[in-house]
Image (cartoon, rainbow, N blue to C red):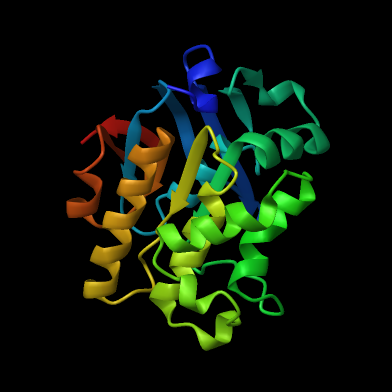
């Protein structure tokens, strides 16, 4: 096994009593209230829950995009609570992948350029060859020079998945990656995501409302009343 995940001491992600509160109309809203989690390298985890339960907020905290109101979080062996934003961003850029519901492709760049961007940012050798190989893995070799607006929703998500995996991340966070797709296309994207995840031996954290999708993961947790509970 040669992936980056193999070199990380367990666990790859750990939450300890994570809470998140926001101020609204002179009152405090508890979005998360004592979330605990331990995730080992190469595990797959699905987080489910009703709309508005805080799933996306929790995912952002796991990835160091948001700071919790209280509690401790460790990602890839780093205590995120003790790092500044630049330090968190460096960890994400080097070892973390993201797939979002709305694809997050740069509209002015074609499919190949979108995938090339993270490789060129870190001056990775043979970047173009690696980006082309990633496009081929998601079945879009013939769409390399198309802009996002010229691609279907399913094709855009395939490009986003190729971009997420091209840097061989240790952990991948996916936030409702099939939420904007029709049922048939969503099924194809689900299959592709799990196939690539297994190939790259990446840890996967998936937020989804689709229980059939969630059940493909090693573990399913439900976010309810601000806490993570076994489903």
Residue 37 versus residue 101 in the image, above or below: above
Q: In front: 214, or 111?
A: 111
Q: Residue at x 51, y 66 (%)?
A: 159
In the picture provided, is 216 more to the left or to the right than 121? left
Q: Give how far across and how far down residue 39 sits, in percent.
A: 41, 23
In the picture provided, is 118 more to the left or to the right than 50? right
Residue 67 versus residue 211 in the image, above or below: above
Q: In which quadrant will I find the C terminus? A: top left
Q: Give how far across and how far down residue 137 sits, in percent.
A: 42, 57
Q: In which quadrant will I find the N terminus? A: top left
Q: Residue furthest top?
A: 9
User: Which image quadrant for residue 21?
Assistant: top right
Q: Does residue 42 show up?
A: yes
Q: In front: 180, or 195?
A: 195
Q: Give how far across and how far down residue 95 sits, in percent.
A: 61, 35
Q: Does residue 67 show up?
A: no
Q: Residue furthest bottom?
A: 150
Q: In front: 197, or 55?
A: 197
In the picture provided, is 219 more to the left or to the right than 223? left
In the picture provided, is 133 more to the left or to the right than 106? left
Residue 126 versus residue 218 in the image, above or below: below
Q: Residue at x 44, y 65 (%)?
A: 158
Q: Residue at x 43, y 78 (%)?
A: 153
Q: Give how far across and how far down residue 179 sits, in percent.
A: 36, 67
């Amino acid at each position: 096994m040669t992936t980056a995940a193999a070199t990380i001491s367990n666990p790859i992600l750990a939450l300890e009593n994570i809470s998140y509160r926001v101020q609204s109309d002179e009152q405090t809203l508890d979005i998360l209230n004592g979330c605990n989690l331990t995730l080992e390298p190469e595990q797959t985890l699905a987080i489910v829950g009703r709309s508005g339960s805080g799933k996306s907020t929790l995912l952002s905290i796991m990835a160091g995009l948001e700071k919790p109101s209280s509690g401790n979080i460790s990602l890839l062996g780093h205590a995120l609570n003790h790092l500044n934003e630049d330090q968190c961003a460096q960890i994400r850029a080097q070892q973390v992948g993201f797939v979002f519901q709305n694809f997050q492709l740069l509209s002015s760049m074609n499919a190949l350029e979108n995938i090339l961007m993270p490789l060129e940012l870190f001056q990775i050798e043979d970047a173009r060859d690696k980006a082309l190989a990633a496009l081929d893995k998601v079945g879009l070799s013939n769409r390399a020079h198309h802009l996002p607006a010229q691609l279907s929703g399913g094709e855009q998500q395939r490009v986003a998945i190729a971009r997420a995996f091209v840097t061989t991340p240790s952990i991948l966070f996916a936030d409702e990656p099939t939420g904007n797709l029709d049922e048939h296309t969503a099924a194809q994207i689900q299959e592709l995501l799990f196939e690539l995840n297994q190939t790259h031996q990446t840890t996967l954290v998936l937020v989804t409302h689709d229980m059939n999708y969630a059940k493909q993961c090693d573990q399913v947790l439900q976010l309810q009343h601000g806490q993570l509970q076994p489903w």
